[in-house]
Image: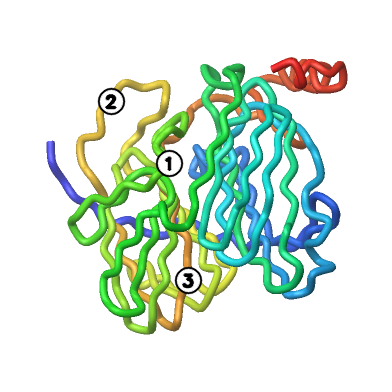
Amino acid sequence: MTATAIREVRLVMQSQPTSDGDGVKIQRIAGFNNRHFSPFLMMDELKADDKKDYVGGFPPHPHRGIETLTYMMNGHFQHQDHMGNIGELRSGGAQWMAAGQGVIHSEMPIMEEGQLHGFQIWINQPARDKMQPAKYVDFQPETITEVTLEPHNLIRVMAGELDINGQVWQGPLTDTGVPATVADWKAQLGSQIQLKVPCQHNAMIYVYKGSAKVLGKTLKQSDFALLPATSPSSVTSHNPVSYHDELLLEATSETGLLIFAGQPIDEPVVHYGPFVMNTMDEIHQAINDYQSGKFHQY
């Protein structure tokens, strides 16, 4: 069966200021129990001009049951974890970690001065993966897929694949637990782009600079728009992707926005701090395992 629908914005959320780690200032969008957010859980925008707002970074802390994708547009961060991985996240690069059964890591700025601007995205892991061994990989700027549509109209694909104006492009990250796409669109006033995403996948857009229209709906800076799947599906179903929906975007100023799409996970979500599991008993087990030092044994 082949058909095409044009996605509409169903809900607009605004990012909220908060802090995390050692006082790092961030703007946060959370959707842990919103089925239209799945498989994504949360997005943090890290943006600061003053070194004191980010110099403390994110000292060692644990995770279980999630994947994190960190994308830095400006600024350098160093990842270090208990498995011995050390990676420098340079401006324009990304790093991915699947926490699985448990990981302890830190993310610390290694730049002396200058602007910090980036994003950390939490992606849920299906139950089948929550107790698998942890994984880590980094993607230097030159490995990110870049598609230049016209001068000052650029899209960078970090994860998954994206149909852009009729041609499919794939990012370097393909190992997510369920299909998930993350891309960055930078455009000038009047630029337009036509994207296609599977009808069973949720889609989201976050405007981090300027403004944009999505099928006539204007989104301003710090808006996070949900464009839900038009056909039911989840990681637990066996329905193949039968058709794709269109996303029509127009830059109404000098614009920067993130594009998310992914296969929903139709499973319970129980969130406690750095742990995301399916039941409260599993959360208690994660806390006990971390406090007893078991994470260091993985």
Q: Label 1 belongs to which residue?
A: 173
Query: Which comes before the other along the chain, label 2 or label 3?
Result: 2
Q: Position of residue 23 (x, y in %)?
A: 84, 57
71 relative to 233 in the view: left or right: right
Label 3 residue SS = strand
Residue name at image x 55 percent, y 45 percent: 95
Query: Which comes before the other along the chain, label 1 or label 2?
Result: 1
Residue 69's tag is none
Query: Which comes before the other along the chain, label 3 or label 1?
Result: 1
Q: Nearer the viewer, residue 51 or 208?
A: 51
Q: Label 3 belongs to which residue?
A: 256
Q: Label 2 belongs to which residue?
A: 239
Q: Position of residue 231 (x, y in %)?
A: 31, 38
Badge 3 vs badge 1, beta-carbon distance below 8 Å: no
Of circles 1 and 2, which is in front? 1
Residue name at image x 67 percent, y 30 percent: 276
